[in-house]
Image: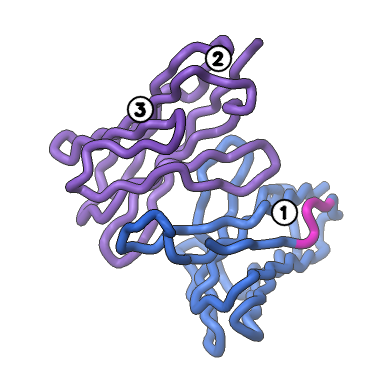
Chain colours: A blue, B purple
């Protein structure tokens, strides 16, 4: 399993500003994932971050709005730029790891999330 | 289009009672199906993972079933506890690793 921490846990920000969310994993992982969970909605993948390469963004998400850094195998940041109230969401960091259930496929582990409110 | 639909959207039950949550999916090619529990203010935590060849998987008071022919899954919670109050999310993994998330069922267990 993997233990994931995120900072900050929550924040209230003003429109037009930017917020950088940090994600720290207790083990080295190849891929880290960033998700958004809007109020009452399911999780939506924003991008996949590999160490040493540019992040891969899903449809509807662009690097200018959500720049991602992946400086090493245990850390990543997601910046929410030029925020608007529509960006109010929970942002979750996730990694893949060994299931530990005796099965041959990987399991997805999630951080506690960062609850962002944009006024 | 790959989709995962869950029902009901929300559910209120009394402590000690059983309940069953449903998940229907149209994901192809199918790799595995996962159930997650998400407590308020926390990230999702995995309860069960099943491949197409597995019909049932238990984790304590949680039992998941999978019918790959009808593309349906259920999560049965036995003898519910107040701590079971959470959102339960059905997630289907397609081959290649893409995860498709359901919208979740919000379960509230009352004393």
SS state under label 3: strand
* For residue A54, side relative to residue B55 (left or right): right
Residue hosting label 3 = B22
Against A80, is B5 above or below?
Answer: above
Mark 2 to mark 1 CA distance (whole Å): 27 Å
10 Å crowding of disc 1: few (<14), some (14-19), many (20+): many
Against B73, is A24 above or below?
Answer: below
- Residue in the picture at 13% in, 38% down: B69
Give the magenta part as a residue range. A7-11
| Chain holding disc 1 | A
Residue hosting label 1 = A114
Q: Earlier in the sequence, mark 2 or mark 3?
A: 2
Residue B12's disc is 2
SS state under label 2: strand
- Residue in the picture at 51% in, 22% down: B10
Mark 1 to mark 3 CA distance (whole Å): 28 Å
């Amino acid at each position: 399993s993997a233990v994931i921490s995120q900072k900050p846990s929550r924040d209230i920000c003003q429109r037009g500003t930017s917020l950088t969310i940090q994600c720290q994993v207790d083990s080295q992982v190849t891929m880290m994932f960033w998700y958004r969970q809007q109020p009452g909605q399911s999780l939506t993948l924003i991008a996949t971050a590999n160490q040493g390469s540019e992040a891969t963004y899903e449809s509807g998400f662009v690097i200018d709005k959500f720049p991602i850094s992946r400086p090493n195998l245990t850390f990543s940041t997601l910046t929410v730029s030029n925020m608007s109230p529509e960006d109010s969401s929970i942002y979750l960091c996730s990694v893949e790891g060994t299931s530990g259930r005796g099965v041959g496929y990987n399991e997805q582990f999630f951080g506690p999330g960062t609850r962002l409110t944009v006024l | 289009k790959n989709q995962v639909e869950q029902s009901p959207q929300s559910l209120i039950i009394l402590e000690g009672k059983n309940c069953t949550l449903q998940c229907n999916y149209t994901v192809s090619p199918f790799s595995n199906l996962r159930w997650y529990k998400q407590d308020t203010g926390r990230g999702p935590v995995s309860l069960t993972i099943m491949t197409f060849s597995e019909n049932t998987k238990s984790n304590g008071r949680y039992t998941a079933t999978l019918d790959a022919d009808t593309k349906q899954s259920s999560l049965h919670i036995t003898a519910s506890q107040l701590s079971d109050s959470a959102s339960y999310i059905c997630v289907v993994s397609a081959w290649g690793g893409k995860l498709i998330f359901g919208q979740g069922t919000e379960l509230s267990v009352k004393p």
